[in-house]
Image (cartoon, helix red, strand yellow):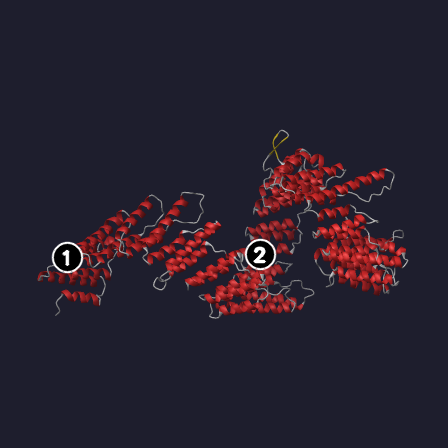
Amino acid sequence: RMETLSPHDILQKLDRYRTTSSLWVPDAHSYNILLGGAANRGDVEFCENLYHWMWEESKNDSLLRPDIATLRTMFKAYIQTSLQTGRTIQNMEAPEACEALVDDWKKRSQSSSVKGVYEALIHVWAHFDPLQSEIYLKSLARQRVEKQGPGPDTVSWNRVISAYAILHDEPSKAAELLEEFWHYSQLLEEMGSMEGASDARPDLVSYNSILEGWARIGNTDEADKVFRRLQMSASTSPNIVSYTSMIKANGSDWERVQELAEECIQAFREQDETQGDGHSDKRHLELDQPFFHAWLQSALDCGEGKQTVQNALAIIDVMKSLGLQPDTKCFLILLESFLQNEDDIEGATRWFIENAKKTMDENSIVSWVTQILMLVDDISIVRPLLQFRGRKSVSLLQTICQDDLLTDSKNVERLLSKLSPQQGMAMLGWMKGKPSSKAYAIVLRNVASDGKLRDAESVFAQWQRNYSLDSVSVEDGALVAEMLTSLIIASSKGGNLGRCNEWIQLWRAQEGVLPKPDQRVHTAVLSTYANAMDANAAEQYLVQLEQDGLEPDVVMYNIVLRALAKSSSAGQAQEFFEQAMTDKDIISYNTIVHAHSKEGNLAEARLLVEKVVARYEKDRENWSVRPDLATFRPLLLGTARFNGRDSGENVEELLLWMERLHEEGVLVEPPDARCYEIALDAWSKSGTTQSAERAEDLLRSMIPLTSASAYATVMKAYKRNPGRKQALFDEMYGAYRQGNKNLKPSAEHFRLVLEELANTSSEQAESFLRRMGHLYEEEGLSSAKPTRQVYNTVLKSWARMSTNSKPAASKRAEALLRDLQSLYLQDGDPKLQPSMESYKPVLILLSKEKQVARLESLFDELFGAYCATASNPSSPTASLEPDTACVHSLLLAYRSTKNSQKARDFLKQLEEWKDSKVLDLNLSISTYNIVLTCLASSSSTSSKKQTELQKVAQDCQTFLLQHMPSRGGITPDLASYQTVLNAWARSRSPEAPSKIEALIQDNMMIPSSSSIAPDHLTFSIWLRAIVKSGGDNSKKEDDDRATKAKAVIQQMKDHGFTPSERDLKLLSVVVEKD
């Protein structure tokens, strides 16, 4: 009954028998069986209660007195609880708990010792500490030698030997103990206690344990010594376990493994022949599955390519010839041999199709297919489709269905449970017979877990074609309910509230046949409302459940509460929390705290947290709502967000409160790393003068919770302080190298230091870049790998440096660019491919330094690289297209060197590239103004004659009025006009004043040109042109210049500009003083 009833149910039945039956009276053995069942379930609390009850009841009924079997069963419960769950028993590890149980036993039984107790403790300690087992063992042996009591039997000796050899990988100690065992048995024999000796003599189990131990740690030489000793023994010889361990030990030596396997099989066959001659029919050597598992595994480990498969298939054939049916593990190792042969899934599938029906049991078929389907995503396996027995194409799953490889519905269901939703749907369609309702329920559940509503409805429609919903039996009702539950869950995950309600109505229509919807259904419906942000509908659904007599659980209440908190306000959520919720847990309180904190209602959030803490402190025994870290985190985040400059101080105060609550036992856990990081972030963003130092102090107090992200936060707090950032980085990296894996630097840490250094010192930034390369290349720190972005940061730093203080800046920058190119060629990582942003800082530096030849060469290199990638779609994706800043660097260099012809030629080339869409350039007014100033700058050369200067001015005017509007589509701005005005003024031509006046009057004084209004400088240039213009210096000419100069001054005043001292000085040159 232990398989169908719980221990508690059986206990009630036993109690009824004890009180009502005179024939069937339970005794200690009855309860020991019950203890064993509970121990197997891991129900240690039930075992302890029943154990103590048996002792109490035995005072009135001696049949219930616990015996040694009771004690052993309790040991088993403790050991299984410890090994399976890691739990302690009454704050003790399992062995100590067993020791305490023995003390309790002695006290209750009023006996100093109990026969068999120490043997049991030997088995207990063997799981955990074989040395303690050995101490008990030798204590019993000494007791036997001194004739003070029974000694340990062979089983006890073997238990300690196997514990050393197998459980704890110490076969050398096991071998030493075996020699002591031989000495002990010989000593008993010498004492004349042959009876005792026969109960304690090393046997085949002793040797096999040590042999297995050497095999597991791969010590072939020691394993061979033990095996030869067995072969030469007069009292015993190797059995199947011995040969299996030897094959494991020699697993990498295929010839030796073959020799051992053939020797074992030969011994088995000779044994059969001996039995046929009338000798004992008791076999010493029985072939078993583990022997063939080890042999197959060796074939897998030693083989290469197709030979591996051939060896494995040969072993399978040997098994069958000896009358052994290969089990699931054999076939899985065979499958692995196919996969080892260049992932030969096709070969594995072909072999399966040809041999499954005649060779494999259904359990093996399920395991084989499951394993292959894990390796292949394609639903049909079907990669590639296989031509087989005349079919055009056949898949593995189709073969199973069409060849009836699985006839047991339970095996079909087991396979379906392991398939993906798509594979399960396909298999349902391929099956010859009618799939069971459970098969549909399994597939539907898998489909629903993916949220695929359409697929889920398709599966249910298939079920309805085979079964009628109206004629469902009560027995199948649970499966139908399961399918409807899956449909509702799928609808919920898909956010389809309408379909969700339709499935609920269908369920209600079958009332009386189907069980009522359970909590999962109602939870799914409520979640659908909540996800749709329809908190009111969710609340109404909850009210309807209560009116129908169903009691919502706290999970349902919390779903509605979260919906109100998200879609409404903290106030509405608080009202529902206080007035509607009859059941609350800590998640409920945390939800309200989060809602208030998110809205900045920190006083309300703090008050609620204080209430939870105070209530728990007052009544810990009866109030189950215990605050946790999730209670405080929203308050920490809200305080950090809404308290401005005081946020760091206030968050740290909350942390201190949390630490105090942990010390007082209110909080199970102290503040974790996340809590500290919130405080660090608050200090980092508070903006106070001491914020960085306070953040660093808090970082020190976090130990041992300090993390790499915490260091990053503190590094961010130090703004414009590269030295402190680098010191923190060095400290963190030093701790990482000493073994603290939580402090492994990430790419962000390197970026924080590098960017800070790049803003202050190019040399230091470049030095840190070199250090990153060393950490990556020499120390294998992957996060330190320099990328294009890292190089670009340093290159831009060099470009920002003044050429006066850094005369070699362009050479340093160009060397960095070449390093980046070299790394990319060596590594091939796209993240290392130089981009236009890598070239641009070097171009800018060369332009500043007037290195025209190098600048032209580098620009041609960039343009050539861009054209190569643009014409090849498979090229790396880093953008190499020159931008406006790149082309301006050339134009500015031409202007600096007064090379107007090159500037004109390059502009013409740019215009052609733009027209032909070779480059997507934005040739703006700035571009044309650079060329224009380059043209005008040639007029500042003192050696030029007036006619040449006049020609320069005329060229500038032509470029301004004709080229810019017509060819570039550019409307000149004020700077453009002033450049031309200056060119005329510098020409000293008699025509200059009239040319300037015409330009100003025609382009700046008319309403349509109001956007280009003259400024003070415009009039000053005009005035200078009048004063400096050449002529015959006649009285009439002087008077004319004076008149024009006065008129310009007047226009200057009319436009709201006050003449400067320089303007008046120029005027005084041509106007006679009063």
Instruction: Give how far across and how far down residue 596 sits, in percent.
Output: 55, 62
- Is residue 513 visible in the rendered image? The answer is no
Q: Residue at x 70, y 53 (%)?
A: 217
Q: CA distance from mark 2 to mark 1?
A: 85 Å
State the residue lying farthest toward the right.
Answer: 192
Q: Residue at x 44, y 60 (%)?
A: 766
Instruction: Give how far across and how far down residue 89 sits, in percent.
Output: 74, 61
1039 on left or right of 467? left
Residue where numbered disc 1 is placed: 990
Kind of residue at badge 1: Pro
Location of residue 966 with respect to 140 vertically, above or below: above
Kind of residue at badge 2: Arg
- The image quadrant of residue 1000 is bottom left
426 on left or right of 569? right
Q: Front-most of 875 and 622?
A: 875
Characterize the local packing of mark 1: few (<14), some (14-19) or many (20 or more) Cα atoms within 10 angstroms. Answer: some
Instruction: Give how far across and how far down residue 815 sits, in percent.
Output: 41, 56
First reached walking from the N terminus: tag 2 or tag 1: 2
Q: Residue at x 33, y 58 (%)?
A: 848
Circle 2 SS class:
helix
Residue where numbered disc 2 is placed: 562
106 on left or right of 710? right
Instruction: Give how far across and how far down residue 107 sits, in percent.
Output: 83, 65
Q: Front-most of 652 and 958?
A: 958
Location of residue 365 with respect to 580 vertically, above or below: above
Circle number at residue 693? none
Q: Front-most of 417 and 11?
A: 417
